[in-house]
Amino acid sequence: MTKSSALLGAATAAEYAGALHAVVDDVAARVAAAEQPFCGASRRELQALVDDVDLDGPPVGTPDALRETAELYASHAVWFHHPGYAAHLNCPVALPAVGAEAMLAAINTSVDTYDQSTVATLMEQRLVAWTAARVGFEAGDGVFTSGGTQSNLQALHLARERALTDAAGARLGGAARRERLGRLRVLATASGHFSVARSALLLGLDDDAVVAVPTDAAGRMDPGALARALVDVERAGDVVMAVVVTAGTTDRGCVDPLVPVADLCDAVGAWLHVDAAYGGGLLLSPRRRHLLDGVERARSVTVDFHKTFFQPVSSSALLVRDPADLARATWHADYLNPAEESGEPNPDLNLVDKSLQTTRRFDALKLWATLRAVGADGVGAMVDAVCDLAAAVHADLAGDPELRLLAPTDLSTVLFRFQPDGVDDARADALVPRVRRVLFDSGRAMVAKTVIDGRPCLKLTLLNPDATLDDVRDVLDLVRSTAHGLLAGQELLELDSPPCRAVHPRLERTVTTDAALEGAAR
């Protein structure tokens, strides 16, 4: 008797269909029934469930394994489609993208070389060209990546390699390379993504290589401060490797002034990188595309499709204005993309020549299906919807006696604190992490916390186009009631002589004899 294979193939195609139908039906039921974004289980409880699974035990078969996995994972997952989720840059996902995800997972294409991917390579390149044209890179190129962190890393890698060339364009080596490497500087604001500083570390730059450029009151890069920083770097005998601006800062959702920054970069020949991981969806916005005016003058741009294009993780891209820049990352291997093939009249199109990754998922398929199903204008309308919702929340909170707005936004964030009259800064500061923790532990709503201008605050990141103003008001009402409860509890603890002090086991007792305690108890 032939043993059934555990692999997807011709003999197991029917089993595959049954298994996937069962998973889809289960997930659909859970999505429809979700009453809050998280179940509220504690980390201790979840750890116990995970530890209880015997990964070395006897096999249970595909149906039982998938049911068990769903009970462990799906039952305790965070649901980003629920309107009570408003914490981080996580979006609900487009239906056609989810279907494409199932397709690419089953086929398991790797788009590193053409002979592994064929039409998938051509589809990714078409989407890269489409996105580059939306940026304004009419002859540009690019490659899909795992996310904004990798896109930013590759952009800075390309900028580093450009900076480490001599006047004739040859790659520096040896002592000359090491000497210049120590003088490379990256100019960015403190509001930029942390991946900029981490990339500098990974690229071997000095600890002080990232120079913080001051911002204006709204958290946007100050062009005047950038001009001074460029001069300071030159006077110090150092080299500007790149200027990094952000189109959609993680906390404030603000867009740096791209045109005046581009003017300065052009004047000194500096590489301009625009991190539009959050704000990239503005490329499709019918009403807010102007916020990205000047992006076409960048040398490289990061776009995260798994944020404001509503794609499943992962789906990002690095775009470059000059296709030759991508060659700075090329590395040849005889078994993969031998160098001698590059001179043939019709060489294979190997995307590994452009990527820091080798094996790489066909994540472009999800965006392809979404654009065909929903249309670029449809995606843009969803981007405008979340920005409109944030604007409505800002208007709703203007003058609120308890929830105080801290900063404006260009995109879909709301920064605020619970601080009614009579609550000083120190007490309001202390409430921020406690409110966030109570809400998280309850599972009923999720908000984030951050620090703006030295003060802790709560943050909503609104990326659900189907959410309404009433949905957000419900979350804010939970913030209010939680904060009031925490304040009331703190006030009880601070009473000089609480009535229970004589008997409460955790309070210093005012009477110490057993007889006195018994009498007090009676």
Image: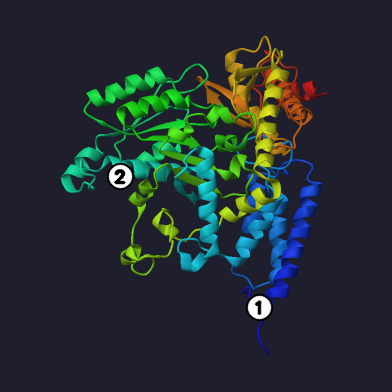
Mark 2 near mark 1, Cβ–Cβ under 8 Å?
A: no
Q: Residue extending furthest left? A: 175
Examine the image and state in which quarter residue 262 appears.
Answer: top left
Gap between marks 2 and 1 measured at Cα = 47 Å
The disc label shown at residue 161, or none:
2
Report if residue 220 is visible in the image: yes
Position above or below: 5 against 100:
below
Where residue 500 sits in the image (x, y, percent)?
74, 21
Where residue 509 sits in the image (x, y, percent)?
67, 21
Q: Secondary structure at mark 2?
A: helix
Query: What crowding class fits label 1: few (fewer than 14 Cα within 10 Å), some (14-19), or many (20 or more)?
Result: few
Position above or below: 65 against 298:
below
The disc label shown at residue 486, or none:
none
Position above or below: 350 against 205:
below
The disc label shown at residue 10, or none:
1
Taking depth in this image into account, of 197 and 512 the one nearest to the observer is 197
Taking depth in this image into account, of 512 and 313 the one nearest to the observer is 313
Instruction: Tell me the amino acid under the disc marked 1.
Output: Ala
Q: Residue extending furthest right? A: 522
Instruction: Tell me the amino acid under the disc marked 2.
Output: Glu
Which residue is painted at 59% across and 69% down in the image? 56
Taking depth in this image into account, of 369 and 244 the one nearest to the observer is 369
Name the N-terminal-most of marks 2 and 1: 1
Where residue 279 sits in the image (x, y, percent)?
56, 34
Report if residue 204 is visible in the image: no
Q: Residue extending furthest bottom? A: 1
